[in-house]
Image: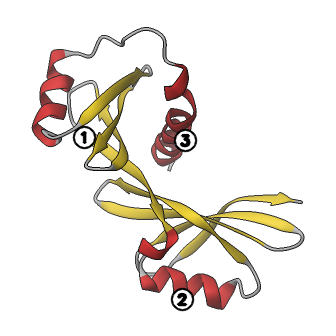
Amino acid sequence: MKKIKTIVTAAAMLFAVTAFATEPIRVSPVVKAAFEKDFANAEQVNWEKTSDFYFATFTLGNVSVDAAYNNDGELVGTARRITTDLVPLAVTLAIGERYAGYKIDKSAVEMNFEGQTRYYVTIENDSQVLKLKCLSNGDLDVERKTRK
């Protein structure tokens, strides 16, 4: 669970900090080779490094994608921003049933980690904003709750 939170936090930070990168990151040859194999058509690649992971932000087609690699060059997870109409139907139905009256944000984050795809969807009503972690089968967990 701690590893998942680290990846989610790092991915969120990556969305925020890539615009402020000033120096190129030295990427280990092992990680760079793995990335080039996994994402041969990637363009506009930017790297960030934490103590445990390398994070690449890049464009694949017309989609912005983030990928996390460990120091051994293993792909740990990927994330991309999608529109909520691309979220699986089971997720959309579960949100509609459990959170009737909430407005769903137009974008979501799709994250692949440890062979499982998760969707992070933000919903709100008059009194609160919820960030939901959703599994493809419609299982929902409240990741964060904020009062308006």
**Label 2 neighbourhood size at 10 Å, few (<14), some (14-19), many (20+)?**
few
> Alpha-carbon neighbours of circle 1 within 10 Å: few (<14), some, or many (≥20)?
many
Q: Which dot marks residue 93?
A: 2
Three-letter code for the amino acid on which mark 3 is drawn: Ala
**46 or 44: which is nearer to us?**
44
Badge 3 crowding class, 10 Å Cα cut-off, few under 14, some 14 to 19, many 20 or more, is some
In the rendered structure, find residue 75 and report the number of the disc placed on it. 1
Of 132 and 58, nearer the camera is 58
Asked if marks 1 and 3 touch (Cβ < 8 Å), the reply is: no
Tag 2 or tag 3, which sits nearer the N-term?
A: 3
Q: Secondary structure at mark 3?
A: helix
Q: Could you give the CA–CA distance between mark 1 and mark 3, rounded to whole angstroms?
A: 17 Å
The residue wearing badge 3 is 12
Is 12 placed above or below 119 here? above
| Lower sequence index among marks 2 and 1 | 1
The kind of residue on which mark 1 rests is Leu
Q: Is residue 58 above or below residue 143?
A: above
Q: Secondary structure at mark 1?
A: strand
Res 104 visible = yes
Residue 62 position in % (x across, y down): 32, 50
Q: Is residue 146 left or right of residue 131?
A: right
- Closer to the camera, 19 or 74? 19
Q: Left or right: 54 with respect to 104?
A: left
